[in-house]
Amino acid sequence: MKRIETEFTKMMGIDYPIIGAPMFLISYEELAAAVSEAGGMGAIPLPNFRTTEELKKTLIKIRERTDKPIGVNIHLSGRFDWKEQLGLCLEAGVKFFISSLGDPRLILDDVHASGGRVFADVINLEQALKARERGVDGLVAVACGAGGHCGEIPTIILVPYLKSKTGLPVIAAGGISTGAQMAAAMAIGACAVVVGTRLVATTESRALTEYKKAVVQAGPEDIVCTDRITGNRATWIAKSIESFDRQPHVRSKRWREFWSAGQSVAQVDEIKSAAEVIREMVQNYHEACKRLVSSIDPGKA
Ligand SMILES: Cc1cc2nc3c(=O)[nH]c(=O)nc-3n(C[C@H](O)[C@H](O)[C@H](O)COP(=O)(O)O)c2cc1C
């Protein structure tokens, strides 16, 4: 299918500006490699791995499946041995790093020296300006309603706001499950989108089958946003957290028991392969763009 060219696809050498979200306990080699092979960019969150040996094995498995670009979410808070993680990722040819929790300056030089890019997860202008000051290459605008830890500002406001105030490339995260939604993100200035919730309900995701089914069955009204579970605002399928009794910090067991998903469950109607999701998104993107062109120039439709 026809490539979609943006600042991000050119920067990364990929066909489509679709990043498969690095999702805790969900995104491993199967999902990341499938998204990259389909022309997007798959990504894994490094907190999935308790030891560097586990990470090393996963990176090897990814490279057995694909030689295309992949990304990672790296936590720089000091809780993880980020130096060793970084070394392994660079060795495996990882070119895209989404930094969260901590100072991205710790990794900028090494990533740049290997030809990679560092984008920072941000939810507001204050965080975006701080990230720019620290020298990141771009921002991931995490909006309200996104799966996982989410922001408070809708995608449609946050993306153009951060882009105009910082001048940095901005990737939209939150509420994007279809190609038409991706076209909307491009229209407001995004150079790519991060797709999380849609990919939870794929054959390659490590979510439990009941969790995948719950994502398909849920509507946006079934999603609650609360800081009760992890201490930070995050979105959950309401039913899955009914039994939660307040605890200060979530353990990974909790993440398995409690199912995070964003409001874009609204557009998730079937468990599919990641390749199908990407293919349909791209097709739907082209159709949406054609509709827009025909609305201003019926002759060109
Ligand atoms: C179950 C789940 C786990 C997530 N875990 C992480 C994570 O570990 N690191 C990260 O950077 N983002 C994580 N996210 C957030 C995604 O990267 C992304 O910002 C979000 O899913 C985009 O919104 P969407 O779900 O509406 O597509 C997670 C999202 C979900 C649904």
Image (cartoon, helix red, strand yellow):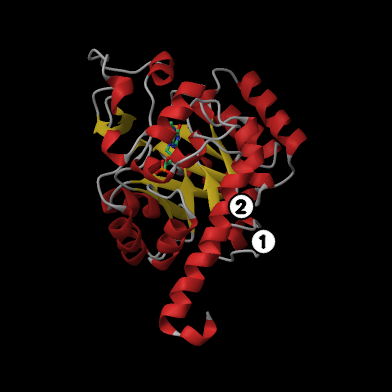
Q: Amino acid at mark 1?
A: Met
Q: Which residue is mark 1?
A: 1
- For disc 2, the marked residue is 279
Q: Residue at x 33, y 21 (%)?
A: 240
Q: Is residue 70 visible?
A: no
Seen at 29% across and 21% down, the residue is 241
Q: Please tell me which residue lies in front, 91 or 61.
A: 61
Q: Quadrant of ligand 1?
A: top left
Per the image, label 2 sits on a secondary structure element best described as helix
The residue positioned 39% from the left and 65% from the top of the image is 167
The answer to whether residue 261 of the structure is visible from this angle is yes
Q: Is residue 188 above or below residue 38?
A: below
State how far apart marks 1 and 2 are (Cα).
8 Å
* SS assignment at label 1: loop
Residue 161 falls left or right of residue 115? left
Q: Is residue 4 above or below residue 64?
A: below
Residue 82 x/y as whole percent: 53, 29
**Which amino acid is tagged 2?**
Arg
Residue 141 percent across, percent down from the top left: 37, 51
Label 1–label 2 contact, CB within 8 A: yes
